[in-house]
Every structure is written in C-alpha cells, then in structure tokens.
Image (cartoon, grey):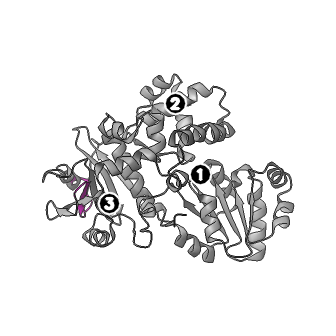
Amino acid sequence: MFQRTLEQAIYLINKTFPVLLLTGPRQVGKTTLLDMCAGEGRQYVTLDDLQQRELARTDPTLFLQTHGTPLTIDEVQYAPELFSAIKLVVDKEKRNGLYWLTGSQKFHLMQGISESLAGRVAVLDLLGLSLAEIEGRVDKAAAFVPTPEWIAQARQHASIPLTVAAVFDRIWRGSFPKLNQDPEISRDIFYKSYIETYIQRDVRDIIKITDDLSFNKFVRACAARTGQLLNFSDLSRDADIDHKTAKSWLGVLETSGLVYMLFPYHSNVTKRLVKTPKLYFLDTGLCAYLTRWPNATSLEAGAMAGAILETWLIGEMLKSYWHHGAAAHFYFYRDQDQQEIDLLIETGDALLPVEFKKTASPARNAPKHFHVLNKLGKPTGHGAVICFVEKDVPLSNEVTAVPVGYL
C-alpha cells in the first residue's frame, strides 16, 4: 500500500468543508485513498452498485437518510440528483466532513456542483502514483519550483540517481497503483482491460459512441501525439472523423483525467506567439501501450523517446501540485521564430522557465531560449534544465541542471 501525498490535504479539507470531491481517472486509487483517511463511523457506498444507483436517482433524500453521515459516495456522477439533496443536509447540519464524494467524470460532476454545492465543496484531483509516492518520499516532497531553495531541499531527500533505463521502465509500466503494487500483473492485459472496461464504458455514458473502432483509432492517434502541438485537422484525418467530433472526443478524454492540455503563455507585449496548446497523456504506460511499444528498451530507443519523457516529466510536476491540493499554473512558450521553452511555471509575478533534456551532460547553452522571456514584461525567476545528471549542477547564475530523481 502506497502512502499518497494527498492525504494531508484531505485531512485539512475534512476540518474546513462539509463536502470533499475527489476526482481522477478510474483505477488511480481514489477509493483506496479515502478509505485510508476515513475514521471510525464513516459509511461507504458505491454507485457502481445498480440498486444503490437507482435509489440515489429516484429518491436521493431517502438514499442519504438510509446511509447517514459521515458518508463516502463512490462514483457520484451516476446520480447528479444527489447534489441538491446533499445541499439541504449540509445547510441544515452546518458541520464539516459530512460527505466525501469520488468521481471519474469531472464534466458531469462540476456541472452539478456549480449549480448546487458552490461554496460548500472542496475539489481535489488525484492522478496515478508519483515518483515520490513510489519511492516513499511523500513526507519530504514539495510542489516543484526550480528555485535554489527547492533544489537544496530535494538534494537532501532524493534517492539514488535514476538512469535513463530506470526512468523509461517507469514510463513504460505507468503509474496505476495496481501495476506498481504487484509486478506479477501483466501490464498488457491490465491496459487492454482498462481500455475495454473503463474508457469505452465511461465515454459511452457521456457521448453515446456507436463506433468503437473509430474511437479506438482516435485514442491511439492522441497517444501518438503526446508532447506535441495539437493539430485537430491531422488528428481528425488519422482517426477518420470530422473536426467537430474530434474536439468533442478530446474534451471527454480531458475531463476524464486521461489527457492534459498545456496552453501557451500569452502577454500583450508580443503577438508572435504560437497559440496552439500541447497535448499530454497523463499516464505514460497507457500512452506507450496505445502506441504499441513492446518494452521499455524499444521505447527509449524509439522515435517517441523525447516526447514521452517530456510527457512523464510534465505529469510528475502536475502531481507535485495536484497531490498537495494546489493549482498548477503551467504554460509553455513557443513563437513563430521556433524559439521554445518546454515549461513556464507562473508563481506570483514571476515566470520560472524549465527545459527537459534526455542527457547526463547538459551543455551550458541548454537553456538558450530563456532570454526570450525578457520581452514578455514579467520578471523571470531561477530556471532549470531537468535531465540525467547525478546531482544538481549550476549552468549559470540563473539556471541549474536538476536530476530527474529530485522530482
């Protein structure tokens, strides 16, 4: 059983909000996490149980009376009728920690919450296991910022340096807890079942897909574009669907927590910035399975190596924020002169630039495009090049090469 970083945020929210909503893809450990955090007396019910789902939908007041409080309701998106009934209980009892809710379809959840539970609920996002969680560094991990202070703290608590081979083994296997708890589980069987059981079923619930073949082609086409600028024309052509359908299906993958859209940073100073977002799969194991890499060695040596390493690093950094209950103000930079910065982290009034490199010997000019930030009209903070150095190394007064293992 892995300790999850989000535990502390759950305990805090339980003391300060009447309702907690934990969202994230299927099988990332939402129910397990809440069960670990629940004290004595908290009841549990799942709406995957069709009888419970029917009662919740047809008589939500009776459903809540039957189970009492405090209560955990799993997969609450199946009964949006509950939100209004929960509001009545919350407003009457005026206590914190009454309801913990989980859901895998954020679109339906947020729609119901904005209408019924605004101001009464705190929303947390859970992804698969982070590197810190797998290595047991939860108590020492902090949200990533490439500052000298963060780097010094990470240096004290990092594990042994990670090799390229070790990282790509993690990338290829993925971050789902079940795959990391039991090495005997077939990774290919797990992902095949995951696609058939969860992705297709959940997607059907939202957009009523009738052509599974086209949807599978679309998901694979998205996986092949991880870490790249999104081009809807190319994506819809490869999946043999129209432009409108591609946008709709991608929105479903995003709200299901399977993909993440990284948007470019904009300012009023320049109009030469590329405005297209970049697409990232949030589980690299699923991405590698969909793109049919048979093992970690072939993935590391293949054409997707750079893009999927960047995908994994973006995911690790997102987890470092989301698993602390914090928002991640992430962007990238790219202009029409092909000058690009992989990641910009906005903290207060400053932009912190980050580059990703698959190298153990980064050149002094690795962050060669960081200077373009001067024209954006905001202060630039300390930057980093995330790579495979054994320990952090200054590349200049403003930029440090940071080992992957510090994340």
Amino acid type assigned to the residue bearing label 2 in the image = Phe
119 in the magenta segment: no
Residue of label 3: 405
Q: Which stretch did the figure color magenta?
A: 375-389
Residue of label 2: 218
Q: How many numbered discs sit on the rendered protein?
A: 3
Query: Secondary structure under badge 1?
Result: loop
| Quadrant of the image occupied by residue 65 | bottom right
Query: Secondary structure under badge 2?
Result: helix
Residue of label 1: 27
Gap in angstroms between the C-alphas marked 3 and 2: 33 Å
Gap in angstroms between the C-alphas marked 3 and 1: 25 Å
- Residue 266: where, in percent of width, then height? 34, 49
Q: Which of pointers 3 and 1 lies earlier in the amino acid sequence? A: 1
In front of the other: label 3 or label 2? Answer: 3
The quarter of the image holding the N terminus is bottom right
| Quadrant of the image occupied by residue 135 | bottom left
- Residue 264: where, in percent of width, then height? 35, 47
